Structure formats: structure tokens, C-alpha cells
Amino acid sequence: MQPDHHEIELTVNGTHYRRTVESRLLLCDFLRHELGLAGTHVGCEHGVCGACTILLDGDPVRSCLMLAVQANGHTLATVEGLAPAGGELHPLQQAMHAHHGLQCGYCTPGILMTMTAYLTEHPSPSEDEVREALSGNLCRCTGYQNIVDAMMDAAARMREAP
Amino acid sequence: MKPASFKYVAASSLDHALALKAEHGDEARFLAGGQSLIPAMNFRLARPSVLVDINALTGLAGIDHSETGQVRVGALTRYRALERDRDFLTSCPLFADALPHIAHPQIRNRGTIGGNLSHADPASELPALAVAMQADMRIRSAAGGRTVAASDFFAGLLTTDLASDEMLVDITFPVLAPRSGACFMEIARRRGDFAIAGAAAIVTLDEERRCTSVRLALCGVGETPVDASAATSLMIGSRVTGEAIDAVAAGVRELIAPSGNVHASPDYQRHVAGVLVQRAIRTAHQRISHAA
Ligand SMILES: Cc1cc2nc3c(=O)[nH]c(=O)nc-3n(C[C@H](O)[C@H](O)[C@H](O)COP(=O)(O)OP(=O)(O)OC[C@H]3O[C@@H](n4cnc5c(N)ncnc54)[C@H](O)[C@@H]3O)c2cc1C
Ligand code: FES
Ligand code: FES
């Protein structure tokens, strides 16, 4: 079959892009290989692990379960946009750092993108609610406890932030 | 893995989408939330040659409460929109129980009710809900339209009554009747996994609190959702008792023939299904407000 190409326009972390993509290109691979935003990780390619989670128009979604062509006209956020280059880390990143919420770091971008959206919508979650919100992000290193601690701390930091 | 090559078309109208499906038949697939189709394409279990993206057809999404006694839900309505519509969850309380069990928030942000029902995974919650609630499925093709009862829609494993040129366009759910209570429960290995077994129950009483109807459907224990309402006939005409509920559970264990999977043997599934039936009927009964 002839490769099927489409022109797309989208905004990622505030930057506008126009590219031509093959229809079978997954959004995660577009971000990584076409835009060089390799902070979005790819683990399973079937929606289970959560490493590829990004924000699509503000909502966390699996970028391995969308085609790049489907992002046409949309606004995306990836882990690279959380903190300005050279600037202070996002409160969620600071809390993950302080509580050792990562070891290899493979799961971390997906967790950060899932939880920034979650904590913005739920500023004062219980620990149980945080665990449930994290249920779609697998981590094979930490055993989750430090991530949960980091999220509780991050929620407090984000409540205090102006 | 990555999907095999295909031609992508973003449908610009319902007629456009239906015309493409009429032209390409089984070679073409509608792309709704993509949360079942894209994984299948990544694994090359599905290799459509034409992908008809219906996500821009906003007319297919939405929850219509305007008709009394029923709620009409557009096929492209995402789980997230259902979870956030309080009126919908009040009218159709089985959804309030079931939606949090479907995958994870990231997947519920994309997945659609129409994609779920058309995919017809027997372990999925929503086909069982549609059967328990006696929903009507409205179907369209370029040639016309028809309406099919949920009980006739699910034809087999991952198979529906939809012909190769047809689209599910909306689903009509009757709202919970007066003096009724509903409950859905399931058991899964981990949060968000497909169910090992699940049970949806709707219990309706008369003014003397005698049972006039019980709707009961199960997921995960057959090739389609299982309508087990017939097993509740012994409850009709009497007040709800623990003995009657136990007898229904025993009847359901007889009725179903689960095939087992890596997480559960058929015997375990049968056992769990019975326990869930007991708990779901009991809870549905408890939820019937005396005021109503
Ligand atoms: C990690 C993970 C966990 C999951 N866990 C669960 C779970 O616990 N329970 C559960 O129920 N589901 C689960 N799912 C599946 C999810 O609910 C899917 O969203 C759903 O099964 C399909 O809906 P969709 O809108 O994404 O459809 P798509 O993937 O876009 O389409 C599915 C199929 O239906 C067809 N189709 C779509 N819309 C229509 C239409 N309107 N008319 C006719 N045909 C149509 C498509 O062509 C395709 O063949 C899970 C998915 C993932 C990735
Ligand atoms: S790579 Fe997308 S969920 Fe695992
Ligand atoms: S830190 Fe290694 S997978 Fe989470």
C-alpha cells in the first residue's frame, strides 16, 4: 500500500508545529522522533503502562493509542513543558525529587502528566484517592510508596502556590 | 509494534462516514476512542485498509435528557462525559457503579460508549449494563436505519448484529423506574483490569414492597453478556429474602458456562459470579428509597 500522508498543525508546550505525517505514525513516536521530545516514554504500546501519558487539550491520554494525524488542531502538553528551561522545577517534580519518587525514571513522565491534571482538579485528595489516580501508571522500581508520599506533598505545595 | 499501513480519512459528516463504510465494507473501520482498535492495530491483530475517523462528528456525542422516561446517549460520548453528568448517573445509576471499573482515567478520557458496545468485549461492563437495562441501539447505514434491542445486539465473542456498512449512532436507556434500586459489582485482578466476573442488578418493588421485576445481567462469564433475569423468577410476587437471593445465585451458577482464563478457573468464575449476584441484588434492594 502507498504511504498515506497528511499535513497536521498542532501546539505542543506552547510551540506551534506544522508537519507532514504518515497516517500510521503513533502520536508518541511523532513527539519523540519528529519533534525530539523524548521525555514521553513508550513502554507497552497498548495502553496498559501509562509511560506515554500526555495532556490532550488538558486531559491525560495515552499517546500510544492515538495517531499523530489525530492531534491535528489540538493543544498538547508533555513533560518537557512542566518547568521552564533552566527555571525552577514544577512543585510536583520538586516533591518527587524530595521523596525519592523515582529510581530508573521510566514511568516518571507519565506519572507527572497524569498527576498534574489530577491535582489541579482535586487539590486535596486522600491517600486512597491518590493511589486510585495512579492506578493507570505502572512503576516497576519504587513500590509506589514514595510516589504516593510525593503526591501528597505535591498537593500541599500546589495548594500553597499562588 | 506499529500499525500496518492504512488510508486515514477524517469523516466530515455522518453521511460521509457511512458512505465510506458502504464503499469499503469490512476493509474499513470506524475510529472512535481508539482504546481498543489502536492496541489491536499496534499488535497487527487488526489491519484495516481504511480508517474512518469519526471524532469530528460532534453531533454523535452528547446525552439527551429531553424525553421523559429515557435517556439517549450518542455513540461518540466519552466515558468521561458520562461520569461527569450527574443527571445521567442519577437516571442510570448502574453507570455510576460501573464506569470507575473501566480501565483508567486516561483511557476513560478517550473511550466512547459506542466504541465499547460495538467492540462487544464479553468481559466489558457496558454490554452487561445495556442488557440489564434493556437499552435500544439505533443503527444507521447509507441505506437507512433500524433499532435493535440490546438482547439481540450482542451476537458472539467480539461480534455484534452490526452489518459491514452500519454504524451504531445512539443508545436509549430507560431511566430507573420508581421503587427501583440498581447495583453493579465486579471482581478484577487489579484496578482497571477487565472483570473476572461482574453482575448488574435492577430490583423493582410494588407498594407493599413485593418484588415486581428483577433484571440481572453478567459480564466476563460467557462469549456475550449473559441475561440471567430468568433465574430471578422465584423472587417475583414476594418480599425480598436472603433465602430467595441465595437461590437465585445458585440458579445463576447453573446457568453460566464460563471458560476460565489465566486469572481464574471456570469454577472460580462460577463461584465469584454467584457471590456478586447475591451482593448486587441485596445492595440494589437496599438502595430502594422508601420515599419513592
Ligand atoms: C489498558 C486498557 C484497559 C481497558 N480496560 C477496560 C475495562 O476494564 N472495561 C472495558 O469495558 N473496556 C476496557 N478497555 C477498552 C476501552 O473501554 C475501549 O475504550 C472500548 O472498548 C472501545 O471504545 P473506543 O471508543 O475506544 O472504540 P475504538 O477502539 O475506536 O473502536 C472499537 C471497535 O468498535 C468500532 N466502532 C467504534 N465506534 C463505532 C460505532 N459508533 N459504530 C460501529 N462501530 C464502531 C471500531 O471500528 C472498532 O472495531 C480498556 C482499554 C485499555 C487500553
Ligand atoms: S506505552 Fe502507552 S500506555 Fe504503555
Ligand atoms: S522508577 Fe523505574 S519504573 Fe518507576
Image (cartoon, rainbow, N blue to C red):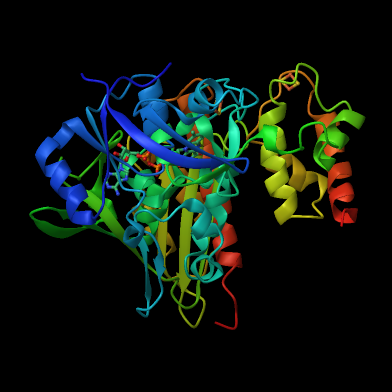
Image quarter in which the N terminus of chain A is found = top left
Front residue of B14/B241: it is: B14
Left or right: where does residue B98 sit relative to residue A149? left
Q: Residue at x 66, y 32 (%)?
A: A110
Left or right: where does residue B93 sit relative to residue B31? right
- Residue B289 seen in render: yes
Q: Residue at x 89, y 49 (%)?
A: A156
The image position of residue B118, as x and y in percent, is: 31, 44
- Residue B102 seen in render: no
Left or right: where does residue B226 sit relative to residue B98? left
The image position of residue B259, as x and y in percent, is: 39, 26
Q: Residue at x 67, y 36 (%)?
A: A135
Left or right: where does residue B45 sit relative to residue A121? left
Q: Quadrant of residue B2?
A: top left
Q: Quadrant of residue B103?
A: top right
Q: Residue at x 54, y 28 (%)?
A: A31
User: Ligand 3 appears in which quadrant?
Assistant: top right
Residue, far left = B143
Residue B271's place in the image compared with B145, above or below, is: above
Front residue of B90/B40: it is: B40
Q: Number of labelled discs?
A: 0
The image position of residue A150, as x and y in percent, is: 85, 36
Front residue of B257/B158: it is: B158
The image position of residue B4, as x and y in percent, is: 31, 19
Front residue of A40/B248: it is: A40
Image quarter in which the C terminus of chain A is found = bottom right
